[in-house]
Image (spheres, rainbow, N blue to C red):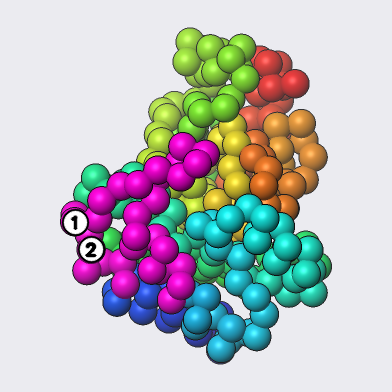
């Protein structure tokens, strides 16, 4: 049974999606940040709503994707004993274009570890959530939803080719070791798809902390294993793009890493 704190976080994600985000679906206009990434005024409004509501659950600061990097870094260094990390709309391009695959991502981090993680897709009313040591769930059903593929050759892989080293990207395109490949455009939800075993393995060339902070816990509590391309633990800090490799279980992760290492990951 999920704790009252986790239930409150899930309810907050649902409420902000319903009240702030979805009334603007198909009408939001795109804007471009200094780094070239997209945002909308809806991202900003959802972030403000979460900044207001989450400290009512745990009274700690909120670090959001749409904040200036200088503020993110200050909040991160001041919040080592506890901090919220949010992506108010993960998959903004999908949201703008009417593609029904985007979500609200919320993580609570203390001492460098995610303690609570929630990712909510308002288009499907799917809430993926976990707390450290308590298992992972989708709308009350324990994850994973199915038994993952037994071998990489039978796996459905989530692969985002952005920022993957060119030799490795070429090998993936011409010598793919898996059954089929998908890329949905929302990193946080793709992590949850590994947790659900909708995806068996996953690779992304560079994610920010708010892309994976919630999903890493949800996936791990569902039995997944992950690392950076070099095999080291994910780098949990703002301002840095982190490559991620994930397998729905330890065996798939090892087989996936072995293939990636043999084809240009290092």
Identified at 48% across, 10% down, the residue is 174
Would you name the residue on which mark 2 appears? 24
Q: Which type of secondary structure does the marked residue at label 2 adopt?
A: helix
Identified at 39% across, 51% down, the residue is 39
Task: Note whether residue 10 is visible.
Answer: no
Report the quarter where the C terminus lies. top right
Residue 89 or 188: which is nearer the viewer? 89
From the top left corner, tell me how far across and down residue 26 is, in percent.
19, 54
Would you name the residue on which mark 1 appears? 27
| Residue 1 in the image: above or below residue 178 | below
Q: Which type of secondary structure does the marked residue at label 1 adopt?
A: loop
The answer to whether residue 23 is magenta is yes
Residue 207 falls left or right of residue 156: right
Circle 1 crowding by C-alpha within 10 Å: few under 14, some 14–19, many from 20: few
Residue 46 or 108: which is nearer the viewer? 46
From the top left corner, tell me how far across and down residue 228 is, in percent.
71, 38
Residue 168 falls left or right of residue 7: right
Q: Give the magenta-colored segment's residue range.
A: 20-49
Identified at 40% across, 43% down, the residue is 32
Kindly check if marks 2 and 1 are in contact, taking CB atoms under 8 A apart as contact.
yes
From the top left corner, tell me how far across and down residue 186 is, in percent.
43, 47
| Residue 44 in the image: above or below residue 62 | above
Tag of residue 12? none
């Amino acid at each position: 049974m999920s704790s009252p704190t986790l239930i409150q976080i899930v309810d907050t994600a649902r409420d902000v999606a319903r009240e702030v985000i979805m009334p603007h679906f198909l009408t939001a206009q795109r804007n471009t940040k200094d780094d070239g990434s997209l945002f909308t005024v809806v991202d900003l409004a959802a972030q403000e709503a979460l900044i207001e509501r989450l400290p009512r659950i745990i009274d700690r600061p909120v670090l959001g994707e749409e904040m200036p990097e200088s503020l993110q870094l200050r909040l991160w260094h001041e919040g080592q004993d506890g901090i919220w990390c949010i992506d108010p709309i993960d998959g903004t391009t999908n949201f703008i274009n009417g593609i029904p695959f985007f979500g609200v991502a919320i993580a609570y981090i203390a001492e460098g570890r995610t303690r609570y993680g929630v990712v909510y897709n308002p288009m499907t009313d799917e809430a993926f959530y976990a707390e450290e040591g308590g298992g992972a769930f989708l709308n009350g059903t324990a994850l994973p939803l199915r038994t993952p593929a037994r071998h990489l050759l039978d796996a459905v892989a989530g692969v985002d080719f952005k920022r993957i080293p060119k030799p490795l990207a070429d090998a993936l395109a011409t010598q793919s070791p898996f059954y089929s490949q998908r890329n949905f455009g929302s990193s946080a939800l793709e992590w949850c798809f590994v947790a659900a075993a909708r995806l068996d393995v996953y690779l992304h060339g560079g994610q920010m902390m708010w892309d994976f902070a919630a999903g890493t816990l949800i996936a791990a509590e569902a039995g997944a294993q992950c690392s950076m391309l070099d095999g080291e633990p994910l780098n949990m800090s703002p301002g840095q793009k982190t490559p991620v490799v994930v397998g729905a279980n330890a065996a798939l992760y090892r087989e996936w890493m072995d293939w990636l290492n043999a084809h240009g990951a290092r």
